[in-house]
Amino acid sequence: MTVTGALAAVLTRDLHAVKRELSAYDDERDIWRLAPGVTNSSGTLAQHLAGNMQFFLGAVLGHNGYVRDRDAEFAKRDVPRAVLLSDLDAAIAAVRRGLQGLSDAELASPFPQAVAGITLTTGEVLLHLAAHLTYHLGQMDYHRRILTGNGRTVGALLPGELRAPRPE
């Protein structure tokens, strides 16, 4: 597996885990509730992650035309779970499109757009996106556990989901 393939696998795995987190709420309204001392709900984080991936991987690398409204990612509330899951599916497609054909050598080249005003290599941006996604995934896991009182795992970081299909 190439480095790019491994990054695609991690990003895809973690986006699927975000979907499992959202699906684990028995009461859909809890996705949007805030716990004391917490500023973002799981719904807000899901919107943010979907927008982030669709922009950086879909629009910037994959040229899919996605237009990001980052402020809306943090402002919209009570979006139905089905819409959030659909947005995450679009983010998964953006990962595939954005990383498809990206060579390991291209990872060392400058990312086509500055991130927070800083010029980084494509590889640095991709590693940042993976860490950012996993950071918020952990926040979502704790949000769900605190608000529902249910400590069960959703299998967020399953190593088996990283394996590329292998011939039998």
Image: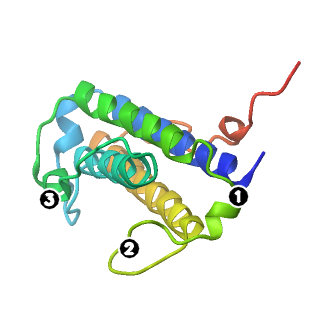
Label 3: how many Cα within 10 Å (few below 14, some 14–19, many 20+): few
Q: Residues within 10 Å of mark 1 (few under 14, many from 20)?
A: some
Q: Residue furthest bottom?
A: 118
Say which residue label 2 marks: 114
Label 3 amino acid? Asp
Q: Identify the residue under disc 1.
A: 104
The local secondary structure at tag 1 comes to loop
Q: Nearer the viewer, residue 57 or 148?
A: 57
Residue neighbourhood size for the residue with mark 2, other residues' Cα within 10 Å, grouped as few (<14), some (14–19), many (≥20): few
Name the side, left or right, on which 111 lies relative to 166.
left
Secondary structure under tag 2 reads loop
Query: How is the rendered protein coloured?
Result: rainbow
Examine the rendered structure and indicate whether residue 49 appears above or below residue 21: below
Where residue 147 sits, quadrant-wise, is top left
Name which of mark 2 and mark 3 comes first in the sequence.
Answer: 3
Callout 2, which amino acid? Ala
Real-space Cα separation, disc 3 to disc 1, in angstroms: 33 Å
| Residue 84 in picture, x, y percent from top left | 27, 34
Task: Using the image as rendered, state which of residue 163 and residue 137 is in the foreground.
Answer: 163
Q: At label 1, which amino acid type do we have?
A: Asp
Q: Residue at x 41, y 48 (%)?
A: 141
How far from the left and from the top, in percent, is residue 10? Answer: 60, 47
Residue under circle 3?
A: 71
Sequence-first disc among 3 and 1:
3
